[in-house]
Image: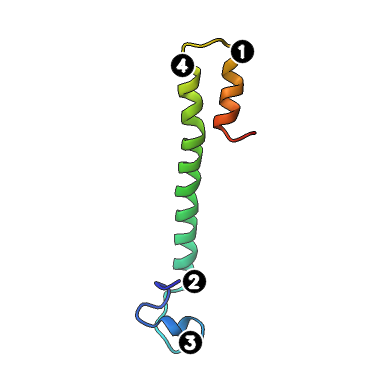
Amino acid sequence: MFLQCPGHGPAVRDQPDQAKCLGVHIQAYFGFFQGSVNLVTDLYLAVFPTYIIWNLNMKLKAKPGLMALSLGVL
């Protein structure tokens, strides 16, 4: 929000037409980029513990419950 109009913080809410602000398309592209990075990170952090738990030396009956806990199902 503060980078939308560099050096003109109040212009974001007061008079955006008079300030030199970034275009809406730049903000949209940055939003898509940020969302993509967050999605990939969340998927990695959700799947990686499952991979580790699957390779543990424990009974097969206990693994699905532990995986469900690591994925935040419960």
Amino acid on which disc 2 is placed? Val
Identify the residue at image location x=59%, y=16%. 62
- In the image, residue 66 above or below residue 36: above
Residue at the disc numbered 2: 24
Tell which residue pokes out farthest to the right in this image: 74
Task: Residue at 46% x, 55% y: name it.
Answer: 34
- Whether residues under marks 2 and 3 lie with C-beta atoms below 8 angstroms apart, the answer is no
Residue 17's tag is: 3
Q: Quadrant of residue 9?
A: bottom left
Specify few, some or many for label 4: CA neighbours under 10 Å numbering under 14, 14-19, or 20 or more: few
x and y percentages locating residue 70 in the rendered image: 54, 31
Q: From the image, tell me which residue sits under label 4.
A: 55
**Residue type of the residue flagged with mark 4:** Asn
Say which amino acid is labelled 1. Answer: Lys
Of the image marks 3 and 4, the number of the one nearer the N terminus = 3
Q: CA distance from mark 2 to mark 3?
A: 13 Å
Residue placed under numbered mark 1 in the picture: 61
For label 3, the crowd category at 10 Å Cα-Cα, with few meaning under 14, some 14 to 19 and many 20 or more, is few
CA gap, disc 1 and disc 4:
14 Å
Q: Earlier in the sequence, mark 2 or mark 4?
A: 2
Alpha carbon of mark 2 to alpha carbon of mark 4: how far?
47 Å
